Image: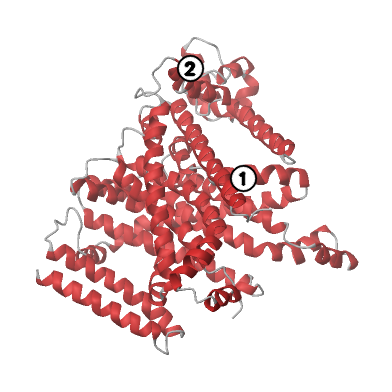
Amino acid sequence: MTWLVIALVFWLGAWAFNAWLANSRWGGQRGARIAVPIIFGITLLVLWEGLVRGLGVSPVILPAPSIVAQTFAASTDLLWEDFRQTVLKGALTGFAIGSAAAIVTAILIDRSAFLTRGLLPVGNFVAALPIVGIAPILVSWFGFDWQSKAAVVVVMVFFPILVNTVQGLRETDAMQRDLMRTYAAGYMQTLLKLRLPAAMPFVFNGLKIATTLALIGAIVAEYFGSPTRGMGFRISTGVGSLSIDLVWAEIFVAAIAGTAFYGIVVWIERAVTFWHPSQRR
Amino acid sequence: MRNALPVLTVLIAILAIWYVAVAPMNIRVALDQAQRGGAVLQPETALERQEVSVWSLMLRNPAQITQTYAMERPRLPTPVQVATELWSTTGEMALNGRAMSKRSLIYHGWITLQSTLWGFALGTALGILGAVAIVYSRVVNMSLMPWAIISQTVPIVALAPMIIVVSSQLGIQDRSVPKAIISAYLCYFPVLVGMVKGLRSPAHAQLDLLKTYNASGFQAFLKLRLPASVPYLFTSLKVGIAAALVGTIVGELPTGAISGLGARILIGDQFGTPLAIWAALVAAAVLAGVLVTLLDLAQRITLRRMGMQS
């Protein structure tokens, strides 16, 4: 009971503090913008801990964050091995191959207006499909190791990036292209100096969508067969053997990996498209 | 309609590539089967064939190429095989009055559709409520928005088995509840972002005008912000429903579900019947297409009624 009361009091206190901070004169500043969500996140953790302890929830159903943290600290070697197998080998390789293939395909298609008009609707449609379902097929084609996971990721990230890049390449207006013509710029020069840079905000939009898809693809593919390592493998066997705390530690790693992956792409985007209005301060 | 011809060309090209790819994908298995049937092949044993590329296998055994297009368990089935399998598990069963049989994809599609729609309704409601809270409360905006973004970078599939374990431990026997939660998790975010944009889309001058009319905050919400957000809402609903379907199928994949399109894929994988997987995949694609098209239609009708579309 005391745990419940403590958690509830903490929740109310943190919320009141956040409300005061957000509406105070520091509300618009950088420090407050970072502090408020962090306090909110800590509140959620405290609530979770309090509820689990206060209501006596069995650790087989939902372990408290403190237990998950202990498991995390105790099995860093295992988690690192899974992280390397799933994220570094499966997801990142697939992401690199898939995005490179999509961007090159988009540039090739873009030379033909006919193909562009045909491929945009088809690509948009395919991007909305539940492509994860092909995971078992690709696992049976490419074997159990990370190659099949990378293949799933390639297929999943290809279409969102393709559609966004094709759209981005059409972004320059006639005036800008005419200017390049008056400079006597050839196709390659126009592409490299005008159209690709102009397409970058769109390309990065696609890349950002693809970061999440890449991790989803790599993990789902592991449910259909993997060597005895990898995050998806550990999660599915962990659920089976009721080592739920390890599963939550893996989920935590997946969350960190997903957020970091997304953050890195956003960081590169900021460096590449510094000229775009949405990036200016 | 201007795009009909290019789209058709692209589709035909995809089918053509698919057909050409069938032979090299299946030739090894086809040759193994032919050998068991007593045929004399070019590299004679299966071990020797492992060393040879598929292309030279096809050149040296041209008689077996037709085999690759009519296999019972192909690595890559032909489009016609997939279409036949799809028809025999949907249309044909419906004609025989067994549309809701456990082997019919209509039944499994219906199970998936139910969870998708529940998840879609839940996710949309959460997204709209969250957006209203974010637009009207500074604290909610500052504390919730970053976490909403982070929640989407967390791969949901990692969480999916846990959601199912927790809900079954809580005594929820119905399998569709955890699936709906997973699809709501994937679908609330596009709705939230779209609605925040939409609710903030009225210009200051318009809000000021309502103030001069002495309109209350609630009236301003009902008469200005909400109508202004409708185009944004529909655009994000279309993204949301596709995400909800992905969520349901992801929820069915890793969990040993026995009904639903994702479960068909899983079962097809376990029993080595690739045609069943392909048919379920195509059925899922059709379902996604129908749902998005319906929402697109609803969007057009609503916007025309509201006078927002020329």
Q: Amino acid at mark 1?
A: Gly
Which structural element holds mark 1? helix
Up/down of B47 relative to A258, above or below = above
Horizontal and vertical percent position of residue A205: 58, 61
Which structural element holds mark 2? helix
Up/down of A8 relative to B168, above or below = below
Residue nearest the observer in this picture, B5 or B195: B195
Mark 2 neighbour density, 10 Å: few (under 14) some (14–19) many (20 or more): some
Residue placed furthest toward the bottom:
A25
Residue placed furthest toward the top:
B38
Residue placed furthest toward the left:
A1
Horizontal side of A69 relative to A186 (left or right) equals left
Say whether mark 1 and mark 2 are on the same chain: no
Any mark on residue B33, and which?
Answer: 2
To which quarter of the image does residue B268 belong? Answer: top left
Residue nearest the observer in this picture, B130 or A190: B130
Confirm or deny contact between disc 2 and disc 1 (CB under 8 A): no
Any mark on residue A123, and which?
Answer: 1
Up/down of B302 relative to B59, above or below = below
Horizontal side of B171 relative to A173 (left or right) equals left
Question: Can residue B45 be seen in the rendering of this structure?
Answer: no
Q: Chain of mark 2?
A: B
